[in-house]
Image: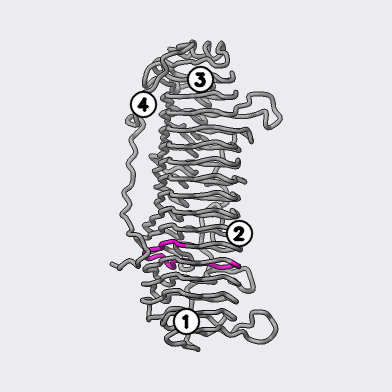
Amino acid sequence: MRLILWALAPLAGLALVAACREPTEWTPSVPPSFSQAGIPTQCPSHADFVATDQASLLAATGAAQPGDTIAVNGTIDVTVTEIDLNTDGITLTCATPGSGLRVGAGANVDYLVFVGAKDVSVEHLVLDAHGVNWGAYVAFNFTALGLPTPDAERERFVDNTVRCGTGIAAGCVEVDNEGAPGAVVTDNRIQSDEGITGLQFQSVVDGRVERNTVFATTPAFAPAIHIDGGAHNVVANNVVTGPWFSALGLDDGNRTTLVRENRLEGATDASIALFTAEDDTLIANVVQCGDFCLAADASPRLVIVDNQFTSTGSTSGVHVQTGSDGTRIERNTIVATAPSTFASFGGIRARDGSSLAIVGNSVVGPWANAIAITDLSASTVQGNSVLGPATFGVWLGAGTSFLPVAMKDNRVLANRVSGAGSAGIFARSACRNRFIGNNLQGNGGDVGAVFDATTGANTFAGNGTIVVDNGNFDCDGDGTPDPNIITGARAVLRGVPFASPSTAPVATRHRIAMR
């Protein structure tokens, strides 16, 4: 089986402004232990086979025909390599509540259950995989790889209580469809005591991961839920808690996944991590931030909307980089209750793209900066409410840039910034940007905006705050400086030294280098 070794890859007292929502204190979930997690209570009234031990279970799986139901009565000790379900359309379930499978004493077991057929259901069982080599359950499609059967697709793994395997290679619940359609993993309780990942979709298309509780009792060096490749999947209404590396990971060409209304907490690195994903939508999730709230790399056209992120001290908040074209970060609440830890990042960090929309977000608390952006063009920062960042409300040209001019042809419109330590807006390496209708009252020194010497041809229409304009940069390379155009400011100051914070790259242990 292919399990991604996630962490072994190269890593790396304020009054709210009107539009800000009241930050709420985070109350961590306390998941039950495996012994307390609750057992499935639904068992079918009819079964074609009832198994009470391993011998009768193996006989039943060998004799079952499509459409048959095999019911487990009591707890069966598994001592073979795995229980194979290789007949299309069969169901493995319980005969009495609490029935299930566990590893026999001293046995060398790879998986408790191995699915290699179409339309197979595993339901209402207790699967104790403590001591297996790999995991509790796997469904695999060899046919899609050009190999002989088994060829799992349209699997159902529903309402099971699962204890994951242990050891460096151990996973838990894995569906590897290699492009085959339609896996359903819903309403399960999954506990990891030591291992790689909790629930993994590998190259699944049109699958669903819904209403699962996935928790770790000790640090795990992979995502709790890992969507690896595939397309058109739904991840909804799950609860993840405990010290996972990430609560949710989407990568390896994953696309068009909908991530909706999950509660994600306890991650030690990025709570949500995306790498070479595209066109994914994350909406209405409640997230306790790890070292990052969300980290995305090489993942264009993300839609990050209506989520609630809470940080008790992170390197960065919602962080997108390297090919972030067309990404929308809208109407999120991003709250820090303790300072963030890197000077040129912030509650929202976006870079390396065009046509981004950062619109209608509420960014509250002592982030180093509320919105820190660079290497963007034709993008919009509009209607955001910012309260209390340590340095800047909106920083254009923040951190390391790989372009001659970091910020070009962007719009910064109708944002409301107060309580920033240094200034409402700071711009450097910025040309032909428009700053219109921003409310920048109540920031450090009553400074609404600062234009660095490396700015030019920007248009600013202010609302009575102080503007420091040191810009006179030759934006078009014609040998003639291009002044900024400042109107509506209470005072325009020039030649005033105003240094930006450190822009050195962040030392990283993440899978990707964050910058």
Q: Which residue is mark 4?
A: 39
Distance, label 2 to label 1, CA atoms, is: 31 Å
Q: Tell which circle, 2 or 4, labels the residue nearer the N-terminal end.
A: 4
Q: Which residue is mark 2?
A: 325
Residue at 43 percent across and 37 percent down: it is 211
Q: Position of residue 82 (x, y in %)?
A: 53, 22
Q: Which residue is mark 3?
A: 91
Q: Which residue is mark 1?
A: 498
Q: Position of residue 189 (x, y in %)?
A: 41, 33
Category of crowding for the residue at label 4, using alpha-carbon neighbours closer than 10 angstroms: few (below 14), some (14–19), many (at least 20): many
Quarter of the image containing the C terminus?
bottom right
Distance, label 3 to label 2, CA atoms, is: 45 Å
Front label number (2 vs 4): 2
Give the magenta range. 360-378
Name the residue type under label 2: Asp
Circle 2: element type: loop
Circle 4: element type: loop
Name the residue type under label 1: Phe
Residue 202 in the image: above or below residue 421: above
Q: Tell which circle, 3 or 4, labels the residue nearer the N-terminal end.
A: 4
Quarter of the image containing the N terminus?
top right
Q: Tell which circle, 3 or 2, labels the residue nearer the N-terminal end.
A: 3
Q: Position of residue 280 (x, y in %)?
A: 55, 49
Residue 56 in the image: above or below residue 296: above
Q: Are marks 2 and 1 in contact (CB under 8 Å)?
A: no
